[in-house]
């Protein structure tokens, strides 16, 4: 039963899944799904709060009826990483809309790695090749040892500031091949994997138009340029295939201005300062470093949004973070 329901969701993703989190809303374990006709919304509940992930999946004309029906059923709600169109509907329904950080888009038709600003990315590829590291695409079915990847991931997790795996906002590692998901591995000179990145597909009208990195892992002693080298290799391969774009994913709390929608000013006061808060970056999550890495690719930054109809959001935010394993 679950497989058939997932396939039903994936059918909608293949047609309407033009945003970064679309694939995750269909396949991420433990998410619940609210349906209105041929349209669904992904969410989880914590402490009586319905925490929604990203935009509805379905035809655009079904989004507002779906959201209205969802809000009729769930009194306490908050919406995370939604796009402009969903934010517009929710503002009309009485919600405050706050920017929560930007996603970065690379338009591959005219993208290249030339120029001074991308010198570091070119250097990463050259350094890896010079030191006999190789990047290649692979699958578990054909050529990648699943147990080695499991061990690599566990070693990575043990080295993090928080030992818990964050989900909801991040899709968990799946040690199996998945439809349309691409995986790239960095191999040491002895052929052993030391880092990898998997990419979720982005669709339009049943065609894969691009990808977004979903899961990244590296051993603590892997080269510092591992992620940059793997990303450059994958981006160039997607370009050769004629894909349209790569979305680099959310940079939490980056680029917040809150000038477009009716924002909760209390929320804005804290979130607009979070990116450069030294204590937050040092003890909890390196927001500044995360944003800096994505800006090295010189892409187009597009804001994502948080929506709530509650003035004091501490309870809903903490519920969401606890549910996601971030607190």
Image (cartoon, rainbow, N blue to C red):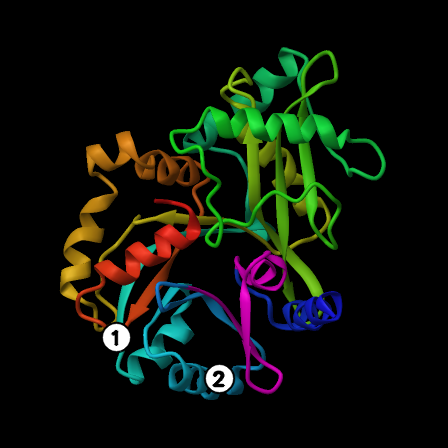
Q: Is residue 11 above or below residue 210?
A: below
Q: Is residue 107 above or below residue 292?
A: below
Q: Is residue 98 left or right of residue 201?
A: left
Q: Position of residue 308 (x, y in %)?
A: 29, 70
Label 1: element kind = loop
Which badge, 2 or 1, is on the more N-terminal residue? 2
Whether residue 246 is visible: yes
Q: Residue furthest front?
A: 47
Whether residue 229 is visible: no
Q: Position of residue 307 (x, y in %)?
A: 31, 69
Near-viewer residue (253 or 105): 253
Mark 1 residue crowding within 10 angstroms, few (<14) / some (14–19) / many (20+): some
Near-viewer residue (75 or 18): 75
* Residue lying at 31% horizontally and 84% vertically, measured from the top left: 93
Q: Does the CB distance between marks 2 and 1 fall below 8 Å? A: no
The verdict on residue 44 being magenta is yes
* Residue lying at 67% horizontally and 46% vertically, measured from the top left: 238
Q: Position of residue 187 (x, y in %)?
A: 69, 21
Mark 2 to mark 1: distance in Å? 17 Å
Which image quarter is the C terminus in?
top left
Total marks in image: 2
> Which of the 4 image quadrants contains residue 141?
top right
Q: Residue furthest right?
A: 142
Label 2: element kind = helix
User: Which residue is disc 1 drawn over?
Assistant: 309
Q: Is residue 292 left or right of residue 66?
A: left
Near-viewer residue (29 or 108): 29
User: Which residue is disc 2 drawn over?
Assistant: 66
The verdict on residue 310 being magenta is no
Q: Which residues are magenta?
A: 20-45
Q: Mark number for residue 35?
A: none
> Which of the 4 image quadrants contains residue 202?
bottom right
């Amino acid at each position: 039963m679950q497989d058939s329901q997932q396939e039903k969701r994936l059918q909608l993703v293949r047609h309407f899944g033009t945003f970064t989190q679309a694939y995750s809303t269909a396949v991420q374990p433990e998410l619940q799904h609210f349906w209105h006709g041929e349209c669904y919304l992904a969410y989880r509940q914590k402490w009586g709060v319905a925490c929604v992930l990203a935009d509805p999946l379905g035809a655009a004309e079904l989004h507002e009826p779906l959201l209205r029906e969802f809000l009729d059923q769930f009194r306490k709600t908050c919406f995370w990483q939604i796009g402009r169109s969903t934010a517009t509907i929710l503002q009309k329904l009485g919600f405050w809309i706050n920017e929560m950080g930007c996603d970065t888009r690379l338009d591959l038709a005219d993208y290249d790695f030339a120029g001074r600003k991308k010198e570091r990315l070119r250097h990463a590829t050259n350094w890896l090749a010079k030191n006999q590291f190789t990047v290649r695409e692979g699958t578990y079915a054909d050529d990648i040892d699943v147990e080695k990847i499991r061990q690599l991931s566990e070693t990575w997790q043990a080295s993090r500031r928080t030992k818990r795996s964050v989900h909801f906002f991040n899709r968990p590692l799946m040690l199996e091949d998945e439809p349309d998901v691409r995986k790239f591995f960095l191999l040491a000179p002895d052929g052993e994997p030391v880092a990898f990145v998997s990419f979720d597909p982005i669709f339009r009208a049943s065609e894969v138009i691009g990808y977004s990195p979903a899961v990244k892992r590296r051993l603590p002693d892997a080269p510092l340029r591992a992620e940059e080298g793997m990303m450059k290799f994958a981006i160039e391969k997607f370009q050769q295939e004629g894909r349209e774009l790569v979305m680099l994913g959310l940079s939490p709390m980056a680029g917040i201005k809150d000038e477009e929608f009716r924002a909760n000013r209390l929320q804005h006061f804290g979130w607009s300062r979070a990116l450069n808060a030294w204590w937050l970056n040092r003890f909890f999550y390196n927001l500044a470093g995360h944003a800096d890495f994505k800006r090295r690719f010189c892409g187009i930054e597009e804001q994502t949004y948080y929506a709530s109809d509650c003035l004091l959001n501490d309870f809903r935010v903490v519920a969401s973070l606890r549910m996601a394993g971030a607190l």
